[in-house]
Image (cartoon, grey):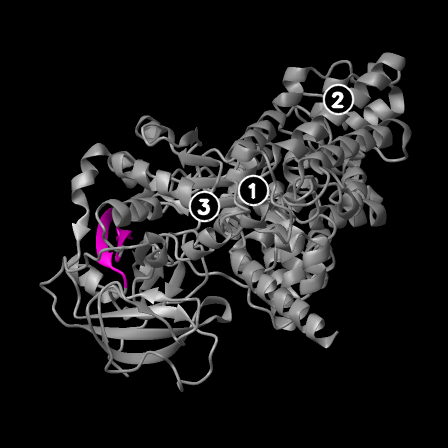
C-alpha cells in the first residue's frame, strides 16, 4: 500500500507502474475452464421467451442474445452447452442475466478461427471495451478517438505491456478504426517509458505524466485536448471516443488472424502487492485463475475486480471474468482498511487531492444527510470523475467515494421520478 | 453455509494513505513538546501541574460528554488531549486548579462537544476557553501579576504589556535572540520562540497543518507591525518583536490552523491567515487588550464559512471562480 510521504505539502502522488522489458514473456495463460459464465445486461423480468435456453449447443464466437431482436449480445467464448441461466444484481442496481456454458471440447482450444465476412458484426464486445458497438453506431459524431495506452487504475500494466510489445499489430487495428468510424484524429496516450514504441503505431502519440488519475478519460480530455466535459455530457457526446490499447489489439487480431476475441488480459495483484499478468477466456471464474496462480483466499479476505482505486469488491470467488475486468486484486484480512462514521474534520486533504476541484468538505456533509439535490446543484456532485482519491486521503476515514456514488445514483433516480411525474 | 468463504465487501478505493485523526493529534502534541519541555524547565513543578491537569481534565470532560450524549468514546483520537495541552500552554504556570478545570470545561464542552464533537466546532475550542478566562478572570491572565514570584535573569515584565503602557523604549532591552530562547514571561508553552518555530516547521512540512495559514498569519503580523513601527517608532514596537512575543507563534502554528475552524481552499486560507495577523496587531497597538491573537483568530473563525465560499469552479462548470 502506498502511504503518505514523509513530507506532506502537496497532493498524493500515486504513480502508475512501469512495465519492464522482460515482463513480456510472463503473461500466464490460464487453460480453458470447464465452465464459463457470461453476463449480459438484462431489461427483462421473467425467464419466459428468452431465445437462449438451457441445453442449447453454442459455438465459440456465436452471438448470444436474450431475445431474438435484441441489439445487445454477448459472444460465447467457448464451444459447449448452456448449463444455466440466472439473474444477478450488479453495481448501482443494474441487473444482469448470466449464462453459464459447460465447455464441450477443451483441447480444441484454437477452434476459434472463423472466417469473418464483416468483422464489425462480431466486434460488439471487445476485451477492454465492452461497448464497442456504440463506436460503430456513432460514426458520424466521433471525430477523435483516443487510444488509452495507460491503464486507468494503479498497479495494472496490461495496456502498457501491449503498447510496448504489440505495436506492430496495433497499427492494423488503428487503420481499421480509422476506416470504420470515420474519426479524423486518432491519438494514443502513453506513459513516457513506451513513447518510442507508440510512435511506430501510426497514431498521434501524446505522452502523459504517469501519475494517477491522469489516465482517466475526463482528465485526458482536459490535459491533452484542452476541453472540459460539461456536466451531464459524456466524452462521446463531445465527439471523443476512448478505447483501450487492448481493444485495438483485439480488433487487429480479428482482422489479420481472423480470431474472434475471446481472451482477456488481466493483472492479478497478489496480497504482497506483486503482480502477474494473466490471459484467460472471458467468463472464466475467478477461482480458476486464483487456483492456477496458487493464491489462497480465506474467509474475511477481500477480493476486488479492478484496481485498488476504482475496482469493485465481490463477496465470492465464483464470479466470472468480464470484458472489462482489467485486474483482480486480493487483500488479506489484515490489509483491509475500514471506513469509520466520524464526522468530517474539515482538514481539506480531499479538496486538495480532488482533480475535479469539488468542495468535498461541504459535499460530504450534504450527502451524509441525504440532501442529494442540494449536492448536485450547489456542491458539484456531478462533476466527480470517480477517481477515489478523496477516500484515499481522508483523515477521518469517511467513505467519501461511496457517498458520492450513492448520491449520484439517488440523484439520477430523483430526476427520472420527476420526469415521469410530469 | 458454515464452510462458505465470504469476502469483505466495501466500496472503492481499497487503499488508504494512512492518515488518521489520532496520528494527526499525536504529531501536533509531538511538535508542541520542545516548547512544553522548555516551559516546564523554566517554571518547574507548577507548570507540570497546570499541563497535566489541563490535559487530563480535557479528556475527562470529553469522556463525560461522550457518555451523556451516548456517542462512541472518542478520547482515543487525541483531540481532547491536544485541546488540553494547548490550553495549558497558553496559561501562566501559577493558574489555580479550579481555573484549569473550568477552562477545559469551556473548551471541550462549550467549545466543541455541544456543537457535535470534532469537526463541527465553528470556533477553536482552546481559544474559546482562553477568551472566556481572559474576560471573566482578568487577573489570572495578567502575566505580570501571576508570575511575580518568579525571578529569572531577564526582564520579567510581560513584553506586550510593557510596550502598550510605556512605548517601544520600554522593550528596547529585549533582543531577538533572547526572545527566541524564551527569555520573556508569558504562557507556559508560548514563550520559547525557537521551539515553537521548530514544531511549526515540522507540522507544516509533514502536512499536518497548512503552511498557507501559518505563513500568511505571520506575514500579516509582520507587515502591519512594520507599518505601525514606521509611522511612529517611539510608540510602536518593531515587527520582529511582535512576531516573537505574546501568543503570535503558538497562534500561527497551533491555534489558527485548527482544522474545523479554518478554511480549506488556497485563497481563503491566505485571507484568513493574513487578516488574523492584521487584526492581532491592530488589537495590540490600538485596541483595549494587551494581546490580540486570541480575539483576532476567533473573529476570523467566524468569517471562515463565508471565506470558504471563494473556491475554484468544479470541472465541467462555467467560469473559473464563483
Instruction: Say which element carries label 1.
Output: loop
Q: Nearer the viewer, residue A147 or B206?
A: A147
Residue under label 2, please give it.
Answer: B222
Residue under label 1, please give it.
Answer: A355
Mark 2 and mark 3 in contact (Cβ < 8 Å)? Answer: no
Q: Is residue B26 visible?
A: no
Name above or below for residue A272 compared with residue A38. Answer: above
Dots 2 and 1 on the same chain: no
Q: Chain of mark 2?
A: B
Dots 3 and 2 on the same chain: no
* Mark 3 surroundings: few (<14), some (14-19) or many (≥20) residues within 10 A: some
Q: Chain of mark 3?
A: A
Cα gap from disc 3 to disc 2, whole angstroms:
64 Å
Q: Nearer the viewer, residue A134 or B198?
A: A134
Residue under label 3, please give it.
Answer: A181
Closer to the camera: disc 2 or disc 1?
Answer: 1
Q: Position of residue A39 (x, y in %)?
A: 35, 69
- Which quarter of the figure has residue B219? top right
Q: Position of residue B307 (x, y in %)?
A: 77, 42
Cα gap from disc 2 to disc 1, whole angstroms:
35 Å
Q: Position of residue A272 (x, y in %)?
A: 26, 50
- Looking at the image, tell me whether mark 3 or mark 1 is earlier in sequence order: 3
**Side of B69 where A312 appears, left or right:** left
> Please, what is the dominant secondary structure of the magenta stretch?
strand
* Mark 1 surroundings: few (<14), some (14-19) or many (≥20) residues within 10 A: many
**Side of B217 where B206 appears, left or right:** left
Residue drawn at 73 percent across, 31 percent down: B246
Q: Which residues are magenta?
A: A262-282
Amino acid at each position: 500500500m502506498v502511504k503518505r510521504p514523509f513530507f506532506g505539502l502537496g497532493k498524493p502522488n500515486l504513480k502508475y507502474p512501469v512495465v519492464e522489458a522482460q515482463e513480456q514473456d510472463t503473461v500466464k495463460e490460464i487453460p480453458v475452464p470447464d465452465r464459463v459464465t457470461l453476463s449480459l445486461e438484462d431489461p427483462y423480468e421473467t425467464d419466459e421467451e428468452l431465445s437462449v435456453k438451457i441445453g442449447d449447443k453454442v459455438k465459440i464466437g456465436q452471438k448470444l442474445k436474450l431475445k431474438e431482436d435484441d441489439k445487445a449480445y454477448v459472444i460465447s467464448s467457448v464451444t459447449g452447452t448452456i448449463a444455466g441461466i440466472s439473474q444477478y444484481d450488479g453495481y448501482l442496481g443494474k441487473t444482469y442475466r448470466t449464462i453459464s456454458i459447460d465447455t464441450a471440447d477443451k483441447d480444441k482450444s484454437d477452434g476459434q478461427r472463423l472466417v469473418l465476412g464483416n468483422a464489425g458484426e462480431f466486434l460488439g464486445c471487445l476485451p477492454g471495451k465492452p461497448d464497442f458497438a456504440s463506436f460503430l453506431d456513432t460514426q458520424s459524431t466521433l471525430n477523435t478517438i483516443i487510444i488509452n495506452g495507460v491503464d486507468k487504475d494503479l498497479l495494472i500494466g496490461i495496456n502498457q505491456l501491449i503498447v510496448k510489445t504489440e505495436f506492430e499489430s496495433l497499427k492494423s487495428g488503428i487503420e481499421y478504426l480509422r476506416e470504420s468510424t470515420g474519426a479524423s484524429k486518432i491519438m494514443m496516450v502513453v506513459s513516457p517509458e513506451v513513447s518510442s514504441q507508440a510512435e511506430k503505431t501510426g497514431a498521434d502519440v501524446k505522452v502523459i505524466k504517469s501519475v494517477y488519475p491522469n489516465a482517466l478519460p475526463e482528465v485526458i480530455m482536459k490535459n491533452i485536448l484542452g476541453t472540459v466535459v460539461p456536466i451531464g455530457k459524456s466524452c462521446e457526446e463531445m465527439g471523443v471516443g476512448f478505447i483501450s490499447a487492448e481493444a485495438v489489439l483485439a480488433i487487429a487480431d480479428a482482422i489479420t488472424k481472423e480470431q474472434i476475441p475471446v481472451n482477456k488480459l488481466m493483472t492479478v495483484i497478489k496480497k504482497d502487492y506483486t503482480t502477474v499478468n494473466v490471459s484467460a477466456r472471458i467468463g472464466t471464474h475467478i477461482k480458476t485463475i486464483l487456483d492456477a496462480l496458487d493464491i489462497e483466499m480465506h474467509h474475511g479476505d477481500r477480493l476486488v475486480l479492478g484496481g485498488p482505486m476504482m475496482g469493485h469488491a465481490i463477496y465470492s470467488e465464483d464470479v466470472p471474468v468480464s470484458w472489462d475486468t482489467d485486474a483482480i486484486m486480493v487483500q488479506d484480512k489484515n490489509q483491509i482498511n475500514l471506513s469509520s462514521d466520524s464526522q468530517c474534520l474539515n482538514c481539506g486533504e480531499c479538496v486538495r487531492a480532488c482533480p475535479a476541484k469539488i468542495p468535498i468538505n461541504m459535499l460530504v456533509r450534504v450527502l451524509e444527510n441525504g440532501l442529494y439535490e442540494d449536492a448536485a446543484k450547489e456542491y458539484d456532485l456531478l462533476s466527480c470523475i470517480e477517481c477515489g482519491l478523496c477516500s484515499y486521503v481522508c483523515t477521518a476515514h469517511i467513505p467519501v467515494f461511496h457517498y458520492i456514488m450513492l448520491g449520484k445514483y439517488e440523484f439520477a433516480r430523483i430526476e427520472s421520478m420527476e420526469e415521469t411525474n410530469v | 453455509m458454515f464452510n462458505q468463504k465470504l469476502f469483505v465487501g466495501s466500496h472503492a478505493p481499497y487503499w488508504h494513505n494512512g492518515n488518521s485523526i489520532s496520528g494527526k493529534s499525536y504529531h501536533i502534541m509531538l511538535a508542541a513538546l520542545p516548547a512544553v519541555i522548555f516551559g516546564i524547565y523554566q517554571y518547574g513543578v507548577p507548570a507540570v501541574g497546570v499541563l497535566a491537569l489541563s490535559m487530563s481534565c480535557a479528556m475527562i470532560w470529553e469522556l463525560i460528554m461522550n457518555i451523556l450524549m451516548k456517542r462512541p468514546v472518542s478520547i482515543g483520537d487525541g483531540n481532547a488531549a491536544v485541546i488540553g495541552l494547548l490550553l495549558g500552554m497558553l496559561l501562566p504556570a501559577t493558574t489555580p486548579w479550579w481555573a484549569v478545570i473550568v477552562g477545559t470545561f469551556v473548551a471541550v464542552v462549550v467549545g466543541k462537544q455541544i456543537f457535535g464533537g470534532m469537526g463541527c466546532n465553528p470556533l477553536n475550542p482552546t481559544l474559546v476557553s482562553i477568551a472566556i478566562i481572559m474576560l471573566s478572570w482578568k487577573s489570572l491572565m495578567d502575566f505580570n501579576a501571576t508570575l511575580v514570584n518568579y525571578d529569572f535573569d531577564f526582564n520579567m515584565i510581560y513584553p506586550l504589556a510593557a510596550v502598550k503602557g510605556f512605548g517601544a523604549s520600554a522593550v528596547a532591552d529585549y533582543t531577538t535572540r533572547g526572545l527566541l530562547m524564551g527569555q520573556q514571561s508569558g504562557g507556559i508553552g508560548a514563550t520559547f520562540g525557537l521551539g515553537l518555530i521548530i514544531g511549526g516547521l515540522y507540522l507544516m512540512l509533514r502536512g499536518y497543518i497548512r503552511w498557507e495559514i501559518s505563513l500568511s498569519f505571520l506575514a500579516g503580523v509582520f507587515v502591519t507591525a512594520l507599518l505601525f513601527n514606521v509611522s511612529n517608532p517611539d510608540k510602536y514596537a518593531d515587527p520582529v518583536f511582535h512576531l516573537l512575543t505574546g501568543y503570535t507563534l503558538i497562534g500561527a502554528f497551533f491555534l489558527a490552523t485548527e482544522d474545523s475552524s479554518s478554511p480549506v481552499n488556497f485563497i481563503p486560507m491566505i485571507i484568513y491567515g493574513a487578516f488574523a495577523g492584521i487584526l492581532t496587531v491592530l488589537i495590540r497597538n490600538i485596541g483595549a487588550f494587551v494581546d490580540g491573537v486570541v480575539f483576532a483568530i476567533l473573529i476570523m473563525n467566524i468569517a471562515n464559512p463565508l471565506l470558504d465560499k471563494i473556491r475554484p469552479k468544479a470541472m465541467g462548470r462555467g467560469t473559473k471562480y464563483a
